[in-house]
Image: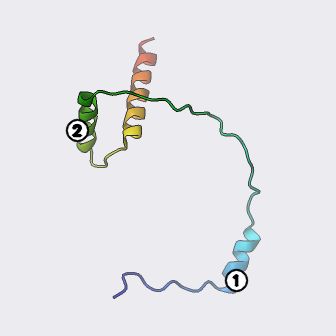
């Protein structure tokens, strides 16, 4: 038993409308910000605390997202205090 219905065949008018819509030319622009990779050493206790904090959320963030969020919160707090 299929869960989805069969995909509809696109009409020629729809195809022509898409072609006429056009698009933009791909470019090789450099991103505005550059990133640097670095190694972060965390002891087992800190890693376990991060795991527990992540598990409490409805949508579990990745380690990267969690640590980036913490860094941004710290920067905002420091900027407010100066």
Are circles 2 and 1 on residues that touch, CB within 8 Å? no
Picture quadrant of residue 21: bottom right
Q: Residue at x 45, y 29 (%)?
A: 39
Distance, label 2 to label 1, CA atoms, is 55 Å
Q: Residue at x 49, y 29 (%)?
A: 38
Circle nearer the N terminus (2, 1): 1
Residue marked by disc 1: 13
**Residue found at the very far bottom of the displayed protein:** 1
Q: Picture coordinates of residue 29 (x, y %)?
A: 72, 43
35 in relation to 1, above or below: above
How many numbered tags mark residues here?
2
Q: Nearer the viewer, residue 34 or 41?
A: 41
Left or right relative to 24: residue 80? left
Left or right relative to 54: residue 21? right
Q: Residues within 10 Å of mark 2 (few under 14, many from 20)?
A: few
55 in relation to 7, above or below: above
Q: Residue at x 41, y 81 (%)?
A: 4
> Label 1's element?
helix
> Label 2's element?
helix
Residue marked by disc 2: 52
Left or right relative to 82: residue 25? right
Q: Picture coordinates of residue 18 (x, y %)?
A: 70, 73
Q: Residues within 10 Å of mark 1 (few under 14, many from 20)?
A: few
């Amino acid at each position: 038993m299929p869960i989805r219905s069969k995909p509809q065949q696109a009409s020629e008018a729809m195809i022509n409308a898409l072609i006429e819509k056009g698009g933009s030319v791909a470019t090789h622009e450099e991103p505005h910000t550059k990133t640097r990779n670095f190694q972060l050493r965390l002891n087992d206790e800190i890693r376990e605390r991060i795991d527990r904090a992540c598990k409490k959320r409805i949508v579990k963030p990745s380690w990267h997202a969690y640590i980036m969020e913490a860094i941004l919160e710290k920067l905002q707090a420091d900027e407010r205090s100066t």
